[in-house]
Image (tube, rainbow, N blue to C red):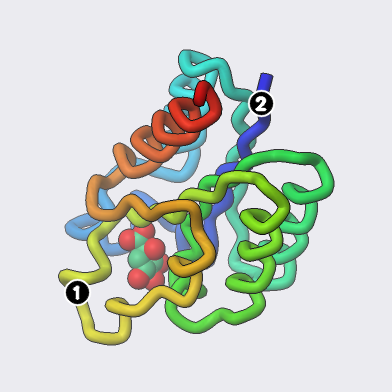
Amino acid sequence: MERVLVLNGPNLGRLGVREPEIYGSASMADLQESALAWGSALGLTVDVRQTDDESELVGWLHEAVDARAHVVLNPAAFTHYSYAVRDAAAQVTTSGLLLVEVHLSNPAAREAFRSHSVVGAVATGTIAGFGFDSYRLALEALAARLRG
Ligand code: DQA
């Protein structure tokens, strides 16, 4: 089975508590449970992780390259300014693996600073604005692409 790392950046461990009117009332543990179920229905081995630490996120992207795992990435605030995350994400896609950038909210419809993603240009594609369904759609898109 193909492996997919579902990687989440800063403050996403606060899902359910943090601005529920934007991010919903479900937790990261709920997302983990849903993503594992979606993955197994699609024939994917899914590993969901969250960190507030930029270097840890960069390390996980390196791990994806070395382990030949595809990536679903919600870089959270790093989306908008982290060239380190962007460069690590580029290593995933330039090594022939798929990387889908996801967002729970639609950053383009929010504050101006959220309208630019430094990660988007190196991602295979981006899905934003559908809450947890952004992750489900990303896994479905990955599975469809892997089926050819
Ligand atoms: C987010 C959008 C980002 O702008 C924000 O910094 C986040 C979450 C989202 O999933 O909607 O932390 O990536």
* Residue 13 visible somewhere in the drawing: no
As drawn, is 12 to the left or to the right of 56? left
Asked if disc 1 is less than 8 Å from ligand 1, the answer is yes
Q: Whole-percent x and y of residue 14? A: 44, 57
Q: Residue furthest front?
A: 148
Query: Element under label 1?
Result: loop
* Residue 81 visible somewhere in the drawing: yes
The disc placed on residue 110 is: 1
Residue drawn at x 47%, y 14% is 41
Q: Quadrant of residue 113?
A: bottom left
> Do the numbered discs 2 and 1 sit on residues whose CB atoms are within 8 Å?
no
Q: Whole-percent x and y of residue 83? A: 60, 81
Residue drawn at x 53%, y 55% is 8
Above or below, 52 relative to 133: below
Q: Residue furthest right?
A: 66
Above or below, 39 relative to 93: above
Residue drawn at x 51%, y 35% is 32
As drawn, is 90 to the left or to the right of 28? right
Residue drawn at x 44%, y 27% is 144
Ligand 1 falls in quadrant = bottom left
Residue ID for mark 2:
2
